[in-house]
């Protein structure tokens, strides 16, 4: 006989003071399991391999951003962009051999493709990852919420066709209208450890338009409901795994937080290397319509998540730099435009951002750099307490 949600609800209430919303969905306890540990309650991936650092103590994350598949399917240049983007993915994955991949939003140009094939574009995007058998997660952007596609539809399709996808949806009520992609992924030192040494956080910045027939603009910021969710998840992690200081974190969100806009005025090419070709302003950061809407998210992110090495965004195709945001004392980094779709300039190049953890030590520096398709690297910096000061 299986024990289901009433028993788990009791356990969760005892463990986290009635903060029982942390599970993405109820699950059954196996017949031979008479006791559920806190660690098991906090395991959102019981059917997937546990993600770990390599035996040499390293861990590499490669970030693809703004792939923009599906543009102009009625002529030749749109599909050719997708062919070129797949070639980039295959080249980078073969060369970099990452331990984990992040696709940081705008997988599809949803307003510029057909409804009948919009979700099958996900199959193309995840094809190189499936072939290489590399685990990965996705965030979603403003072009992934359009009349012909939604974030939820992309997530559901990804989970159907990619066995090593660690993307998931937040509990109901978290994320606001068309913003379901808020979740975290634990990374362990080794498979036998009780607690992870690194947590990758993923947030849904929404934007774009709601689906047909009554399509209308959507808010372009992480919803306020996510702030309370971050707090409750962080509390549950501490109760299950011990002090937050014992593990590191990195956060991914497609549209940059509003607080990042002012950083561009004081960039130093020596301290903040990398392409700086996109002027930040209306529409280029969260909360473009009115100041303050993404502040609850920004406050909770920085107030509750410890050892946060960086907050990483795409969205602005012409930017690659990292900088320290002084009000929260946190490092922000742009991705690299990876897809041949979407706006851009050939002189900017196409590529990825790499994150390299030299050690599982949660306080150790993390190395990051931009890698272009042909192999050129640039904008290499160390993410640590000294960076940007």
Image (cartoon, rainbow, N blue to C red):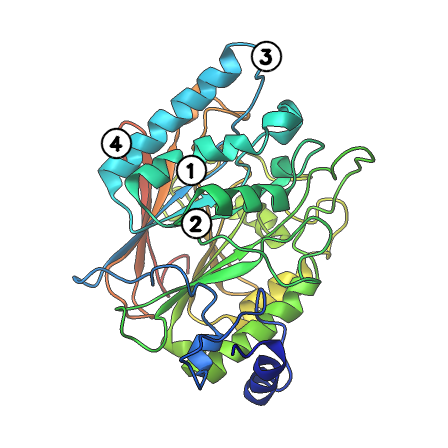
Give x and y (percent) for residue 115: 66, 27
Q: Which of the numbered marks, if any, corresponds to residue 126? A: 1
Residue carrying label 4: 375
Q: Looking at the image, is mark 3 or mark 1 earlier in the sequence?
A: 3
- Give the mark toward the camera: 4 or 1: 1
| Left or right of 187, for residue 26 | right
Q: What's the CA distance linking mark 4 and mark 3?
A: 32 Å
Give SS at disc 1. helix
Determine crowd level at label 1: few under 14, some 14-19, many 20+ residues with C-alpha closer than 10 A: many
Q: Residue at x 60, y 60 (%)?
A: 170
**In this rendering, is residue 232 above or below 272?**
below
Residue carrying label 3: 74
Disc 4 + disc 3, Cβ < 8 Å: no
Give x and y (percent) for residue 142: 64, 39
Give SS at disc 3. loop
Q: Looking at the image, is mark 4 or mark 1 earlier in the sequence?
A: 1
| Left or right of 214, for residue 234 | left
Q: What's the CA distance linking mark 3 and mark 2?
A: 30 Å
- Quarter location, residue 32: bottom left
Residue carrying label 2: 165
Q: What's the CA distance linking mark 1 and mark 2?
A: 9 Å
Give x and y (percent) for residue 77: 50, 12
Q: Nearer the viewer, residue 281 or 256?
A: 256
- Quarter location, residue 380: top left
Q: What's the CA distance linking mark 4 and mark 1?
A: 22 Å
Give SS at disc 4. loop
- Residue 70 makes an appearance in the image: yes
């Amino acid at each position: 006989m299986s024990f289901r949600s009433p028993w788990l609800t009791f356990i969760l209430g005892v463990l986290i003071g009635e903060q029982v919303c942390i599970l993405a969905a109820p699950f059954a306890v196996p017949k031979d399991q008479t006791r559920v540990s806190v660690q098991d309650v906090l395991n959102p991936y019981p059917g997937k391999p546990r993600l770990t650092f390599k035996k040499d103590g390293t861990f590499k994350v490669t970030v693809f951003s703004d792939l923009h598949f599906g543009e102009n399917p009625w002529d030749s240049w749109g599909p050719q962009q997708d062919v070129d983007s797949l070639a980039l993915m295959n080249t980078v994955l073969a060369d970099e051999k990452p331990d984990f991949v992040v696709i940081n939003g705008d997988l599809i140009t949803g307003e510029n493709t057909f409804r009948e094939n919009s979700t099958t574009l996900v199959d193309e995007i995840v094809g190189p990852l499936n072939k290489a058998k590399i685990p990965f997660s996705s965030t979603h952007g403003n072009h992934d919420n359009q009349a012909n596609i939604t974030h939820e539809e992309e997530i559901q399709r990804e989970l159907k066709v990619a066995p090593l996808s660690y993307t998931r949806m937040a509990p109901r009520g978290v994320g606001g209208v068309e913003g379901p992609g808020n979740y975290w992924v634990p990374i362990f030192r080794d498979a036998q450890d009780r607690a992870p040494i690194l947590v990758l956080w993923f947030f849904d910045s929404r934007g774009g338009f709601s689906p047909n027939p009554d399509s209308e603009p959507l808010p372009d910021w992480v919803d306020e409901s996510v702030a309370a969710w971050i707090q409750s998840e962080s509390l549950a992690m501490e109760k299950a795994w011990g002090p937050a200081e014992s593990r590191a974190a990195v956060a991914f969100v497609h549209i940059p937080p509003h607080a990042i806009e002012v950083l561009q005025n004081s960039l130093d090419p020596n301290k903040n290397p990398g392409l700086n070709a996109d002027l930040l302003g209306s529409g280029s950061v969260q909360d473009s319509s009115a100041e303050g809407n993404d502040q609850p998210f920004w406050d909770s992110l920085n107030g509750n998540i410890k050892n946060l090495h960086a907050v990483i965004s795409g969205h602005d195709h012409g930017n690659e730099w990292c900088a320290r945001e002084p009000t929260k004392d946190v490092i922000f980094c742009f991705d690299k435009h990876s897809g041949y779709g979407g706006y851009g300039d050939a002189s900017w190049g196409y590529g990825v951002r790499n994150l390299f953890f030299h050690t599982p030590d949660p306080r150790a520096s993390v190395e990051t750099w931009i890698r272009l398709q042909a192999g050129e690297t640039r904008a290499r910096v160390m993410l640590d307490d000294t960076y940007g000061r």
